[in-house]
Amino acid sequence: MKKTLTISAFTLIIGVLLFFGVVPPLVDNHYNHLTGAEPVSVSEAQRQQHESLFIADLHADSLLWGRDLSKGYSRGMVDVPRLLQGRVALQAFSVVTQTPRDLNYGHNGNDTDSIFWLGLSQAWPPRALNSLMERALLQANRLQEATLASRGKLRIITRQSELRSFLDDRQHDPELTAGWLTLEGAHALEGRLENLERLKAAGFRMLAPTHFFDTELAGSAHGLQKGGLTPLGREWIRKMDAESLIIDLAHASEQTIDEVLALHTRPLIVSHTGVKGTCDNGRNLSDRHLEAIAATGGLIGIGFWEAAVCGRDIDAIVRAIRYAVSKVGPQAVALGSDWDGAVLTPIDASQMEQLTTALSEAGFPQEQVAAIMGGNLRDFLLKNLPE
């Protein structure tokens, strides 16, 4: 009997070790990798042009997967070494706190929770397993830890003054990169607007009202009802305005977008999207919404994945960028890769010179390439982050 118990205990221990040690990288590797598209050839002159630019991206879910982002990995799409290799100066790190099982672009409820199981496999503490707010704070802390472990290579930007200081320092040392925190779906507030202050204190500077399901604040493009703002959502917008926080309308329903446009008084961002003009689906923006968001002084981040651009290579990204520029001008267009967002993309953070080259070869003037690749986001944040 004793021998049987010993064997059972040993089996349990091995099972636990395998679950916590093996499952997270397997899941990460399964969901986050490249399409295998033919790489764009980059000349030395084109590489030098790329290195002269300020490169910035509006959306990566890299904090979710349990990697130490200060280290280089052969899986996933973003870490500090790859950001430096790709000359990415500023990366938005988006925090995901709940996604539905069998996630789709059509109809999702909030009654399932895939992130619970991902967190369990990473040995998240009980408070994070049981609270969406705590999950957001845990991932924010991961970025803080990566910053400390990077030995000065990675900084966190929360204010205009910090961004200006970073820009000055990077003029002398290009081996610097920075991140800022965004939240994908305000369901992490857990229905309590006072939690907005906790998120702001943790470094979050941009929040989306929805992700893949309808929330207490608003309807999602992928929810069951796809409605607009709730009374709490309207109050949330006023509080976001008062706190100088940025609203992200990625994943919002058409009605939510219209109602936010009617109520909000500050520039808006759609962090990662496609455009219906090149890829017509419920996930992407119509011409009307492109123009309305740009009219606020806002930005549209063009995504890199297939459902955003209807293609698996860089040419599809360039087509979407060209279309958006044709509708709203180059000053309103930015990059929103969705790296590490359980999607396949043609390039990771280390390969951004390929996109710079593809835009140049597609006939975009150099000043437009510089704006789209990151200048527009830099200038937006210098005006719209808290001072």
Image (spheres, rainbow, N blue to C red):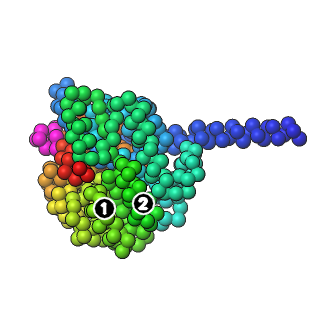
Q: Is residue 247 above or below residue 375?
A: below
For residue 71, say whether it is visible.
yes
Which residues lie in the magenta part?
A: 360-372
Looking at the rendered structure, the secondary structure element under dot 2 is helix
Residue at the image point whose x is 16% and y is 40% from the top: 370
According to the image, label 1 marks what residue? 240
Inspect the magenta stretch and tell me whether residue 363 lies in it: yes
According to the image, label 2 marks what residue? 195
Residue at the image point whose x is 33% and y is 41% from the top: 156
Looking at the rendered structure, the secondary structure element under dot 1 is helix
Three-letter code, disc 1 = Met
Three-letter code, disc 2 = Asn
- Left or right: 368 in relation to 215: left
In x, y percent, where is residue 168? 20, 34
Q: Is residue 81 above or below residue 355?
A: above
Query: From this viewpoint, which residue is outermost toward the top?
Result: 44
Within 10 angstroms of label 1, few (less than 14), some, or many (20 or more) residues?
A: many
Label 1 vs 2, first from the N-terminus = 2
Q: Is residue 294 above or below residue 57?
A: below
Within 10 angstroms of label 2, few (less than 14), some, or many (20 or more) residues?
A: some
In x, y percent, where is residue 177? 30, 35
Task: Name the quadrant containing residue 90.
Answer: top left
Q: Report the disc number at residue 95.
A: none
In x, y percent, where is residue 7? 79, 37
In x, y percent, where is residue 294? 18, 59
Give the overall secondary structure of the magenta segment.
Answer: helix
> Which of 160 and 31 lies nearest the eye of the viewer?
160
- Left or right: 368 in relation to 85: left
Inspect the magenta stretch and tell me whether residue 136 lies in it: no
Residue at the image point whose x is 41% and y is 41% from the top: 143
> Which of 192 and 139 lies nearest the eye of the viewer?
192
